[in-house]
Each structure stands twice: as C-alpha cells, then as structure tokens.
C-alpha cells in the first residue's frame, strides 16, 4: 500500500486523504470498505507528515549570511 504513495506528490496525497475523510464522515461505506479507507487514510497521513517534515528541514537549512544573501547549509 505504501509503495504506491511514493509516486504521489504531497498535494495529490493530501487531496486523496481529504476525499477519504469526507467519505468516512458521511458514514455510507460498508464496514469493510470503511476499514480499508481508514487504513489508506492513515498511510496517507503518515506520508504527508513525512513530506512536511522534509520540507521544514529544507526551509530551516536556508540561512541568511551577514551581507543579506541567502544560502543553504547542509542538513545534518
């Protein structure tokens, strides 16, 4: 299930997660389908969080030099 997540962009994964949440909120899914959707949603949430953490690390790696220019520093 997580293998196909790596092909998704953050935006695609988030949109799919939002669609799953809407389906679950409506409550019209059969129990087995709801469980499968919940599992997929949990995997998507974890994937989105990982992407956000990676983006945050990249942003934090950008530093401003004394002359005002921006540069990146290697991530640890």
Image (spheres, grey):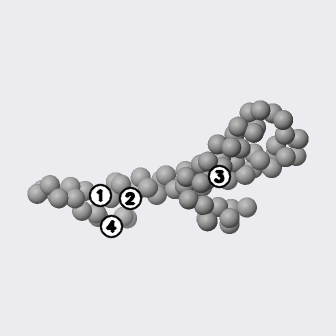
Q: Disc 2 vs disc 1: Cβ atoms closer than 8 Å?
A: yes
The kind of secondary structure element at disc 4 is loop
Displayed quadrant of residue 62: bottom left
Q: In the image, which disc is placed on residue 58?
A: 2
Is 47 displayed left or right of 36 in the figure?
A: left
Q: Is residue 44 above or below residue 29?
A: below
- The residue positioned farthest toward the top in the image shown: 26
Q: Is residue 20 above or below residue 26?
A: below
Residue displayed at 69% across by 48% down: 41
Relative image position of residue 24 (x, y in whole percent) = 76, 37
* Tag in front: 1 or 4: 1
The N terminus is located in which quarter?
A: bottom right
Label 3 vs label 1: CA separation? 28 Å
Q: Disc 1 vs disc 4: Cβ atoms closer than 8 Å?
A: no
Instruction: Specify few, some or many for label 3: CA neighbours under 10 Å numbering under 14, 14-19, or 20 or more.
Output: many
Label 4 vs label 2: CA separation? 9 Å
Which residue is label 4 attached to? 74
Lower sequence index among marks 1 and 4: 1
The kind of secondary structure element at disc 1 is strand
Which residue is label 1 attached to? 62
Label 3 vs label 2: CA separation? 21 Å
Is 66 displayed left or right of 18 in the figure?
A: left
Residue displayed at 34% across by 54% down: 60
Which residue is label 3 attached to? 44
Displayed quadrant of residue 19: top right
């Amino acid at each position: 299930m997580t293998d196909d997540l790596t092909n998704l962009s953050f935006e695609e994964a988030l949109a799919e997660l939002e669609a799953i949440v809407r389906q679950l909120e409506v409550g019209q899914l059969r129990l087995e389908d709801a469980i499968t959707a919940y599992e997929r949603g949990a995997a998507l949430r974890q994937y989105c969080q990982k992407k956000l953490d990676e983006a945050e690390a990249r942003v934090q790696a950008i530093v401003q030099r004394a002359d005002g220019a921006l540069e990146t520093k290697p991530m640890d």
